[in-house]
Every structure is written in structure tokens, then in C-alpha cells.
Image (cartoon, rainbow, N blue to C red):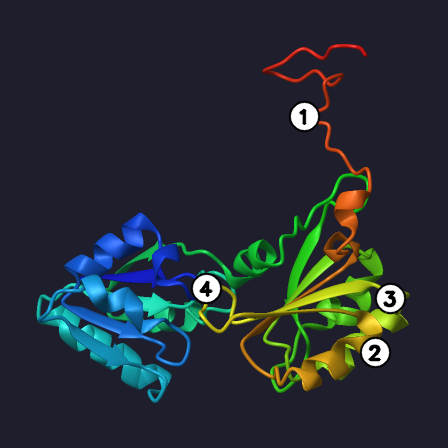
Amino acid sequence: MKLFIVGAGPGAADLITVRGLRLIKEADVILYADSLVNEDVFQEAKPEAEILKTAGMHLEEMVDVMIEHLQAGKKVVRLHTGDPAVYGAIMEQMTLLKEKGVDIEIVPGVSSVFAAAASAGAELTIPDLTQTVILTRAEGRTPVPDREKLADLAKHHCTIAFFLSATLTKKVMRELMDAGWAPETPVAVVYKATWPDEKIVRTTVENLDEDMRKNGIRKQAMILAGWALDPAIHEKDFRSKLYDKEFTHGYRRGVKS
């Protein structure tokens, strides 16, 4: 028995991978998080395919459904939003499935963090400014390990992408500024990146909560923070070595000006 866990991408149906779309076309049964996955992605599924919503299922119920169909000889796809590797809650599913002898293949997807960066027209790593991106979430009902508290992560002063944090913006603001972030540090909030109702809010650390409140954003938002999100970044001279004409690398010899 083999189950396919497929990343559906951030929202737009045509941002699923070629491999993921092929599996959807071949699937007899598809389970998906109906609150997050764009149903347009099922347009090329087989007419007879069984498409099951999982938002109302608990873990054991969902796994039992998958195993039942796999034992019946059906091709089963478990569809996750974005990329399953980041806040996908796939490990708990895999643990129970492997106990039942199920093989698993994971197909990556376009993560919402990169879809949000694209929508915001941003490069998250800028030469001589920041070369590190931290993917994290603010601590709420689900705790984070002590060594990963935002107050400590923020001390690196690099680009930070916040998943699952749209209701915790006051906490985000406080901990960033406690870590020495300037109040005017740029922030881009992307609501439902690549969906038809996508919204982009450009703000700063000190205005984050208020601007999100004004725009009615309290879920399904990626928060990107750091000076790489500066709307005026294109006016500044941050050039990489890769395309510097004086820089020699394995494919090109540099030329002095």
C-alpha cells in the first residue's frame, strides 16, 4: 500500500507541481483540507474520483479512511496546502500510517512564504543586508520550544517569515522591538497569496497590528518582516557577487573595470 502526500501550493490552482497534478488526475480518492485548498485543483480529477473534505475529521478518523481505501486497492492522495514540510502536520499522519504498513511518498509544493514574497515583489535575501530567512510562528495556544522563542530568534535581525500568526500581531510587535528592531522596520502582510481575493498590506513593525485590524486580516496571512521588505529597496545598491562583472566564478572570469 502506498499513500501520496501532495503539496497543493499556496492557492492558485496552476501553482501545483506537474507531478502533483498528475497524481490528482490518477487518484481514485483525494482527501484535502477544505478550508485551505483551492477546489479548482480538482477540475482535472477523474469524474469518478471520491473527493473527501478533512476539516471536520480528527487524526485517527482521517487515517482510518485512508487505510480503508488503500486496502481496497485504490490510489489515494492526501492533499495539503502549500508545502507539506512546513506546518503540514504530516508526521503524525505518517506515524499512524507506517504502523499499518503504508508506504508514503511526499510531493513538495510551493510554500505560502515564497508565494507571498513573489506577490510582494520581494527577494528575502539581499547581499550586504541579510542572507538568512527564519521561518517561524508566534507562540499562542501551540507552544514553541524554549530555544526558539521569538525574542531570541529576532536578535539575528534577518528576514523573518511568520506563519500562523495573524491573531498574535501584538505579541510579534512587542517581541521584535524588545529584540532591538526599529519601529519603522518594513513589514509586508500577504493575505491569501495567489488567491483571487489576495490582499497585500505594507506596514511597519510599530503599525502591524493596527494596519491588519484596519484591513480585517486575522487569518490566512503570511507576515514578512525585515529590511529586505523595504519598498524602496530597489533604489539602493545591494548587488550580488554572482553577476558582478569583476567577480570570477566557475562559469565566468571577472573583468576589471
Labels 4 and 2: the sequence-earlier one? 4
Give the spatial CA distance, label 4 vs label 1.
Answer: 31 Å
Labels 4 and 1: the sequence-earlier one? 4
Is 59 on the left or on the right of 194, as rendered? left
Q: Which mark is residue 243?
A: 1
Residue of label 4: 10
For the residues bearing labels 3 and 2, Cβ distance under 8 angstroms: no
Q: What amino acid is found at the position of numbered circle 2 in the picture?
A: Arg
| Residue 186: x %, y % from top left | 78, 63
Q: What amino acid is found at the position of numbered circle 4 in the picture?
A: Pro
- Where is the C terminus found, in terms of image quarters? top right
Element type where label 1 sits in the image: loop
Position of 102 relative to 50 (above/below): above
Neighbor class of circle 1 (other Cα within 10 Å; few <14, some 14-19, many 20+) is few
Position of 21 relative to 95 (above/below): above
Element type where label 2 sits in the image: helix
Q: What amino acid is found at the position of numbered circle 1 in the picture?
A: Tyr
Q: What amino acid is found at the position of numbered circle 3 in the picture?
A: Glu
Image point (80%, 69%), residue name: 204
Judged by depth in the image, the label closer to the viewer, 3 or 2, is: 3
Residue of label 3: 184
